[in-house]
Image (tube, rainbow, N blue to C red):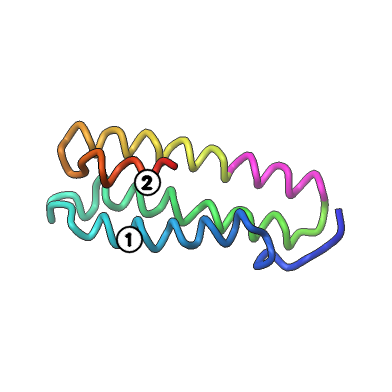
Amino acid sequence: MAFQSFRGLVAWQKSMELSVVVYTVTAGFPNTEQFGLMSQMRRAVVSVPSNLAEGQERGKHDDFRRFVYMARGSLHEFETQIGLSERLEFLNKEEANPLIE
């Protein structure tokens, strides 16, 4: 694997964009969710670019792979939280679908 800055990773760039969107969308959640689902979703989505950056900067293929798996796990966690947000009617389908895509 040729070493490049984590900022050059398309997955890192897209996950940074997703993080910004999630912060914007969750700002509309009820205040009672500030330390609940809102916080969980934000932490899950922020961990994606964070793990990609850390794994890339370690410079070893095996380390990077491990951190990619952690990032993928956070995405699945986030997708579950989107589903719960829909069921609780904090998000509608029009808001949730683009987050999943």
Mark with earlier residue (1, 2): 1
Q: Nearer the viewer, mark 1 or mark 2?
A: 2
Q: Badge 2 is on which residue? A: 98
| Residue drawn at the location 56% of the way across and 40% of the way down | 72
What amino acid is labelled 1 in the image? Tyr
Residue 61, given in percent of the width and then of the height, sits at 82, 48
Marks 2 and 1: in contact by CB < 8 Å?
A: no
Q: Badge 1 is on which residue? A: 23
What amino acid is labelled 2 in the image? Pro
Q: Is residue 90 magenta?
A: no
| Residue drawn at the location 64% of the way across and 60% of the way down | 53
* Vertical side of 83 occupied by 49: above or below: below
| Residue drawn at the location 32% of the way across and 60% of the way down | 23
Kindly indicate the quadrant of the structure image that contains residue 5.
Answer: bottom right
What is the secondary structure assignment of the residue under circle 1? Answer: helix
What is the secondary structure assignment of the residue under circle 2? Answer: helix
**Region in magenta:** 61-70
* Vertical side of 36 occupied by 27: above or below: below
Main secondary structure type of the part rendered in magenta: helix
